[in-house]
Image (cartoon, rainbow, N blue to C red):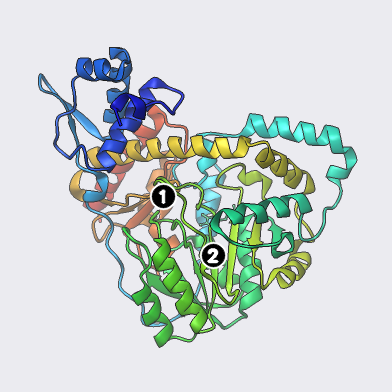
Amino acid sequence: MSATSQVNNTPYLYQQVINLISDMRTNGTLQAGQKLPSLRQLSASLSVSIPTVKQAYFELENQGLINAKAKSGYFLNQESSQLSQPKKARSPLKAITVSRQQLIEDVFNAIHNSSHNVALGVANPVAALPATKALNRTMRRVMAVSGDKALHYGPMNGYEPLRRQLAFGYMDYGMSLSPDDIVITNGAQEALNIALQCVAKAGDIIAVESPCYFGILELIENLGMLALEIPICAEDGLTLKDVQKAIVKHPVKACVFSSTIANPLGCVLQDEVKKDIVELLEQHDIALIEDDVYGDLYFGPKRGTPAQKYSQRGLVLTCSSFSKTAAPGYRIGWIASNKFGAKCAKIKRALSCSSSLINQMTLFEYVRSGEYERHVKQLRQVLLTNKARMINKLHSYFGDDVRISDPQGSCVLWLELPEGSDSSRIFHLALNQNISINPGTLFSPSNRYQHCIRLSYGLPWSDKIESSLKTLAQICQQAKISA
Ligand SMILES: Cc1ncc(COP(=O)(O)O)c(C=O)c1O
């Protein structure tokens, strides 16, 4: 296929040039260190103007993918995945009670009580490309058609057309779910809460990834369960061997895994590994609660398959929401399970009666119209660009002092600072400069990751973000010196 025919599918010409170079880099046609065609050459071969190629090269340079050498031209940089990634932690000796609530509260209060923060500590990818206008328009349409009814209590397990639509969506993976297998919840957080209550009780051992999303730890703490950390690696996530080791040594009742895209590491679990893990867990009667909130924010060629697809015995419960792709404030999520649908619905009723009907109706229309799909597609592109920019800036401000994850989706980076760094102290110093971050210990029940921090690139990119990253690097450097 000629270069010209490959650049035709995106709205902006310079973006088409970027996509072409990125594709050629991914498929190995272009290699690290290789010289790129000159502006004039590429403009002639793609039949686009020189300023268009210049803008694309400028953007690629900003993202750290290429660099300009004086009087020599443009050269392809090394892939960020070939740079140092965070190291895998050691396996734990035992399952433990969790006590992260106070720390989570302190961090939340600090982050959300200030309106001046550069919010690198909040994982809200939609902030990078808000869907506000389209959602407002859709909600007005819903109100015009449904009037008062949209403001009534809705069905306990959720608005039927939305449940049907979600069940239909799983058909893409060859999964057969009925609308009654779906329970609409107040965000994925309530879905995880219900799923945990459905398959486990106080005192049971719940295996989690390490590092893992702190909201899961808070639920385990609240429900009086114990957490067993299974360390995952930044490149590939969980391994079958580590899961096997954990369940042989410990009487695990259930697992909560971000089976598609992990938070905070952003790694993608390959479908074959997922399948093997589901088979293993079901052989041992262990339920898997999959947290799939980031599943649609993938950067690779295709979305990962939900783990539930590989379930033979119905022991997999899928939890997700519209929070990371449309509007976290709508608080609409769901659980999909063809074995536990009725039990989940009962727990949901006891917990919160039902979820906002008007928000469910609006999201149903938003998805049905095709606007949601288009928005998520653009959001992925914006996040991918932000990720490259942030990694590039971090490498230039932090130098070799830091290992940085190379997420294959989602909106967060995991930074491993030199051993001895105190991320709690860095958190407070950064807040004094109006920058919020997440200290690493939030992500482990056993106080691991003291020297790590999580940063979000789910923000509209600006000079302020770049200068905040520079300030953060200085803070980390100072904290190291005075430690
Ligand atoms: C991995 C993960 N799971 C679940 C949630 C909770 O999502 P929601 O806002 O839909 O309750 C979050 C939110 O940050 C998350 O990062």
Quadrant location of residue 397? top left
Whether residue 275 appears in this view of the structure is: yes
Looking at this view, is 108 or 344 the one in front?
A: 344
First in sequence: mark 2 vs mark 1: 2
Quadrant location of residue 368? top right
* Residue to which mark 2 is pinned: 309
The kind of residue tagged 2 is Lys
- Give the spatial CA distance, label 2 vs label 1: 43 Å
| x, y percent for residue 439 | 40, 55
Q: Residues within 10 Å of mark 2 (few under 14, many from 20)?
A: many
Query: Which residue is located at x 78 percent, y 57 percent?
Result: 354
Q: Secondary structure at mark 1?
A: helix
On the rendered image, what quadrant is the C terminus found in? bottom left
Whether residue 117 appears in this view of the structure is: no
| x, y percent for residue 183 | 71, 61
Looking at this view, is 172 or 392 the one in front?
A: 172
- Quadrant of ligand 1: it is bottom right
Most extreme residue toward the front is: 1
Left or right of 120 in this view: 37: left
- Closer to the eye: label 2 or 1: 2
Left or right of 294 in this view: 477: left
Looking at this view, is 453 or 8 the one in front?
A: 8
* Residue to which mark 1 is pinned: 428
How many marks can you see? 2
